[in-house]
Amino acid sequence: MHQEKNEQEYFTELKGRAAQLDGQQQELAQHVMELGRIHYIREDEEPFNECQRILKVQAEASGEPLFKPLAEVLRQLIGTTAGDVFAYITEHVTEYPYSTGYERKPFRTSDITFHTSRIYKRMVQLIRMDWIGFSLIDYLTKKDYEHGNDYRIQETISDWIAYELDNGNPQVLEALKGIVYGDNQTALLTRAMIKGMLLSHQEENYHMIGELLAAAKLQEGLRQSIVEQMDEGTPEALVYLLKVIVDQGFIRYSSVVRALAVWTGMGLESANQRVVRQLIEQAYEALTNSKLRQEWLTSANANEVYMSLWATAVHEERDLYGQVRQVMEQGAPYQKIVALYVLSNSGNKDVRLGIAREYLNETDPELQYWVLTNYTSNYFYEWVEGGTVADRIVKVVRTPLLENKEERRKDFERLHALFAQMKKGESAEPSKVLDFVNVYHRSDAPIQKMLYLVSYDMDATWIGEIVALKDQISPDLRGELLNHFVRNPDDTVQREFIFSSLSDKSMSIREFAVAKARKLTLAEEEMQQMEGLLKLKTGSLRQSVIGVLLVQPDKSLNGSLERLLRAKAELQRLGGLEILTKIYADPERAEQYETLQPLADIIQQPTAKEEQLLSKLGQEDAYTGTNGFGLYEPAAKEAWLEKQPDLGDFRLGDVFVGSLEKMKRFLSGLNELVHQHRDVEYTAEYYSGYKETLLIGANFRTVRLAQPNEEAVSMLSLYPLHEEWSRYLQESDMEASELLELVLYDRLDSMDQTLDRYHRYFSNHNMDYSELRKHKLLEGWRKDFAEQMYPLDRINEMQQWIAELMYNDQVSTLINAYFLDTPGDKTFDTIDFSLNTLMQAMPKDRLAEDMGMLHLLSSPWIGLEKGRVYDDESFKRFFHTFDNYNELAGVLNHFYSPLELEDYFKAYEKGLIGVGEVYRELLAGSDSRRHMSSLTNACNTWIASNPEFLEIRRTVIDRLLEVELVRGDLPTEATPKVMGLSRIEGMDYFIRILDGLDKETFVRGYVYGYGDRITKKESFSHLLKACYPRDGEDSALLKEKLSNAKITDKRLLEAAMYAPQWIEIVAGYLGWEGLRSAAWYFHAHINEGFSAEKETIVAHYSPIAPQDFNDGAFDIHWFHEAYETLGEERFDLLYDCAKYISAGANHRRSQLFADATLGKLKLSEMKKSVEDKRNKEHLLTYSLIPLVKPPEPDVRERYDFIQKFLEQSKKFGAQRKASEALVSRIALGNLARNAGYDDVTRLVWDMEARKLENLRSYFEPHALEEATTIQLVIDEEGTADIEIVSKGKTLKSIPARFKKDEYVAALKELKGDLVDQYRRARKELERSMESGTAFMMKELTGLLGNPVLAPLVRTLVFKAGDRLGYFNEDTSGLADPSGQQFPVGEEDKLIIAHPLHLYESGRWSDFQKDLFDRQIRQPFKQVFRELYLPNADERASATVSRRYAGHQVQPNKTVALLKGRQWTVSYEEGLQKVYYAESLIANLYAMADWFSPADTEAPTLETVQFFDRTTYKSVPLEEVPPVLFSEVMRDVDLVVSVAHVGGVDPEASLTTIEMRSVIVQESLRLLKISNVRLDGNYARVEGSLGEYAVHLGSGGVYKQAKGALHIIPVHSQHRGRIFLPFLDEDPRTAEILSKIVLLAEDQKIKDPQILTQLQT
């Protein structure tokens, strides 16, 4: 490889120069050269530390600057200029901030030790610059300078530019002026250039950057590049540009706000412009006025205190520390909090620690938090290779402040005292002062610091003091203490802690304690403690205890075993027998077993479980992996599989013999063909059904996805213009072998990088990631091996040539498709021989450790061979090759093999291998568990269609279960394999599983079961869930098989509830009338998820939707039927068995509901719980308690109570409001069923209509005194009011003397109720229209009898059949605007017409005109409601609407609007609305990118999508009910109209590509831009730096031959109108036009982020 030779030659040359140096200079040069080979320097590198040692010695001896000798060495090694640049860097480095990265702060310090790492990185980059021949002038004058994008030198380019500018290099200055002020004719502006000018000390350069900032306008990326680096230059540069920002008001740009947040460490919101403007002005003042900084230190304004401290640290961080101490001694608490927060941003951990140590006596909780935050020292863990969490080693970062143990003792005591007085527990709350910070209080945080102090020397006394506090600290920290600090088991306190932890409440700590005990030799008392744990059922703990006892000395174990076998508790005896069987199975403990064997006779009357374990003793023919489970011979292998193939005279190099000229000509032509068709649009479909319109020149992919079971299809036919590509191939005369060679160039990894670049191949190597960086792939034996296998120079030449093709991605895709369409027989031999050649040539002693090298070289062949199999013989060779490949050492679990389980069965079917090889793969292969899943997966029809395959499956399952079902506490070799079984069939298994479980409970919820410690409970529970009845098995057979089994009826019921596939058979066996219905009743009400089968069965019994059951709906009729049929005793028994259905609280909830329905709960208590605690389960229960007689008043009272609960929820947050709205809806449904209504809507309208029945007297005049009466009145629109008449005159208000009158108070309350009813009715009527709720004639008549509701109902348009009109109670029919009457029958259903129905009728305008003519006001927008139908764009994209993409909205206003329309807003789900009846979720996605300026912006709306509520799959827009679609779009439109940001008026007509085309065309004409043409969905731009396409729908930008470009949009409120005449009504259109204009004038682009993409 060319570059590697250069590197070798370069460092050989350096070595020669170093040899000419004297003494320490030569030694220093040697270490410099070692560092020069390392790309990422760490401070623990040996050459780094050696350099530092030498430099310190010389500095102490000479008194000269520390790095001066290093600069001199560099002058000798890499030239005077480079040495001078290095000297310049070391001279000025303290003038720049020392921290880097996203969380950096611009703090500066004159202490050069904080810059050491940066100085060495610059040195290494200077060496690389010399090695590659970097020229700064070329970089500044050439547009495509080859070394300009080398990421390894970028930081030092900036320093070099600053050096030349400060030394008055006119050539550099003029070049930069040309770049900044020119038209992109020379080099393009980069971030390194900007930073270089900021690092310099010439104000002229800051002025240039200031002008660039002012000219940025639409180039948000340019503005971002400047402001993000402002703080990294000189303080003078920062101040200069801050003044530019302040003077010109650039704080309005989000990139500036974000940069200010990064500089200061303050969380800022761009929406609060006043505060942000004030802060940046304060920053400028504080930086420029030292006197003001001192004054602000004692300011009452927290921001001024903050800026004072921050600005001090920007100038010199050392001055900050004294100021922090001053504030801590004299300041108010809020000032102290600010001071400690600013201090926490410092990178000087020792100073932070020193200050924090002084204030460990603070009593304010938030101050305690910040003191502990600044107490920076902590311990960390070092992993032991192959070890567990418990094996980690505690490491401590030492500090000079605490090297003295007496100092540590002081801190230990202070922290102990702090812990003692802190409130125990954890909490999180906003800071009292810093509104952008959350404070996390953890009472055991001081303990963590105490453990750090302990970790210096592991002082046993100190550890003992912390152990004494164990009950007051969190389980996590208690676990750390036990795992990593209890190291001396001879210490009494530590040893007692280990054994007391055996009974800790935390199971994980018990496990840790057992692991500790395993390493100890236990005393008899301790042995008995361990034996006591075997009284517990917890499987994992029992496994651990048995493991501990097994490693104890023989004498101790003998005594323990005897005690266990004589124990009264069966669980202890079983533990003893488990130990005995384990010793028996170990050949190395045969002698010990002979001694212990008589102990088995202690158990004279064994239980069934004990009998199982006793039967293992003396068993000679147990099935294990050693004997192939009795199904295959582990040592035997098919002879033909072990033979190496005869490769004859095949040479791998002969594959690469095609004419390079011909191949290059073919690829060039293909590249040109792509170029010709670059503007062709095509539609591509993705997995979700989403479709996108793309351009061939920008993004080339298949137009559709090949289906799994699809007949063989040409790969090329899946791509757009496939006929065109096919024609080109036919005319080119390319052979399959030549296409193969091209595919290999494409698929082989480039081999000129360091090992870290091939991490996927070398991740299991014995080098860590940083060590991998130090080694080239091609060095040592790897280089020799690669050169032996491949013609590397030829491959490298072709790979580089292909990479330079303009459309290399498209060309790569096409040559792969071409090759995959060639007949397999043309290239199979070559591929198979090539792979075998590599396998045979790989050094055997390298396989285990360096399998990655073989896989890297063979990866293309591995990926190709299976697809080339074309007949039985080629399949046989393929199978042979990969069977051998899988046997290679080092393959296991690391590399992909295309040999699947189906291939083994296929080989068996063809007679290539015997059944033993199939069993070996199934039971001994590394994928055994996955194979079990495939073997028993009903979807794999290839198994079910072959009787022999079915027999293999049956045999494997039988054998595994034969082993597993007699296990004890310890797992068997079969355990991990049976955990992969997804389905087993047979009643015998069902009975044996239950028999083996005996009285053990089942695992509730999901059974994980991974690793080597799977418990019996886990494996048996999994098997029970996976066990299904065979066809033909019934209750009679169950009765026959249970005749001798000891399985109780209750156990059968538990099993049936756990595995409901057995319900029918168990119900038939028990013969309980109603059991089936009752069992499914429990599954419906307790289950947390519904399979398709379960959903179908439940639907037979209840009309309630599955999700409603999960949310708390209760089918009262089903309950009574089940309860009354079974009887109380059996129902209660079944309820107890049903606890296994759910892992959550649904089981307890179902009992609560049952008790409520049976009248066992008091209505008053449930009501009080809801009122006092807002207990949602009790609200559901409240609706289920039997109604008193007569029921109507009780129903009305409960209805009002639930509505009141719902109304009160409005004061809470979005999530709580949504959950309470849901529970209110479910509670009303329960109440409706309790009261006998068909559905909740009927309940709602009946309650609203009846509300006035008992209030009629209040509408009559009531005498308050002789001449004064009062009454309720309702106006013509249904609004209630109180009317008071005195002496014939209506008063405006109630006289004060009557305000305490009881009747008046009652009237006021009733008026409030009626106003609530009016408001509620309006919402319910609108909701009824949206949901299409049907009304009967009688119901509408009832509504019209209510004076509040009647005015609302009369004005609405109803629909009955195909007739539309207003409901007329006099004629019991509908009347249209012309007065024509349409009769409606008693049984006919009417719905409130939606605009969709008005639109479809063709009479929409008639109704609109009628409302105007008659001056009718409707209760909500009906006739004048907006209608939204899917447009062409939406139909084309299938599942996604971008109708409102690009609109920015105010978050708070948006949430308020949508919450009122039943949307929920959360961080996880975004904005969504659930439609339960339609089982759909509407989702509104809003863009929020944390790593671009948008993170300080209001959200930008992107897409609207619909998902199935049960599967969460995307639903095509055309399948969404039209009314639902329209209402969702109306909600979004409402948000866009009302909650938009800035001066935008988004009340626009439908945004379409056609509309945008017109706007863009007209705008370009006005702007006199002629290099843009509009074609289809794209604007095509012919720029000076390339050809671009901007999608008129999404705004996506593409560069031909390069793909997508990321251009950060300037959001609408910042964009200004000058560039966008008349366009601010549509932010996305404005953004698209701004991008088109930007790219049309790409010679003016100065945004480094865009320019880098254009160059790459």
Image (cartoon, rainbow, N blue to C red):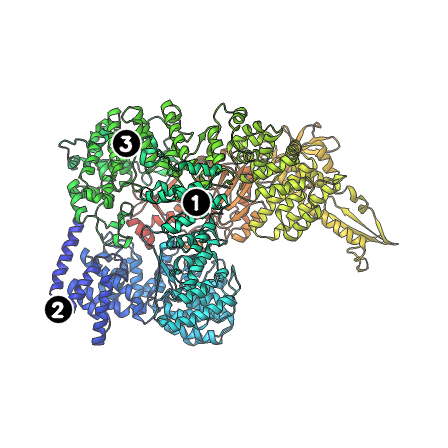
User: Which circle's residue, 3 or 2, is located before the other in the chain?
Assistant: 2
Where in the figure is residue 1494, as x and y percent of width and height? 43, 53
856 above or below 1102?
A: below
457 above or below 1023?
A: below
User: Which circle's residue, 3 or 1, is located before the other in the chain?
Assistant: 1
* Image quadrant where residue 45 sits: bottom left
Report, in whole angstroms, how far the alpha carbon at label 3 lies from the one at label 1: 53 Å
Name the residue nearer the viewer: 1619 or 824: 824
**Residue 1394 image label:** none
1311 above or below 106?
A: above
Three-letter residue code for mark 1: Gly
Name the residue nearer the viewer: 106 or 511: 511
* Image quadrant where residue 1355 sits: top right
In-image side of 88 versus 514 (left or right): left
Report, in whole angstroms, how far the alpha carbon at label 1 lies from the one at label 2: 75 Å
Residue position marked by numbered label 1 in the rendering: 576
Name the residue nearer the viewer: 430 or 1650: 430
User: Which circle's residue, 1 or 2, is located before the other in the chain?
Assistant: 2
Is residue 462 something that shows in the picture? Answer: yes
In-image side of 367 versus 1604 (left or right): right
**Residue 866 image label:** 3
At mark 2, the secondary structure is: loop
At mark 3, the secondary structure is: helix
Q: Residues within 10 Å of mark 1 (few under 14, many from 20)?
A: many
Is residue 337 something that shows in the picture? Answer: no
Three-letter residue code for mark 2: Asp
In-image side of 1350 versus 319 (left or right): right
Residue position marked by numbered label 2 in the rendering: 22
Where in the figure is residue 258, as x and y percent of width and height? 42, 59
In-image side of 1271 versus 1037 (left or right): right
Report, in whole angstroms, how far the alpha carbon at label 3 lies from the one at label 2: 63 Å
Which of pointers 3 and 1 indicates the residue nearer the eye? Answer: 1
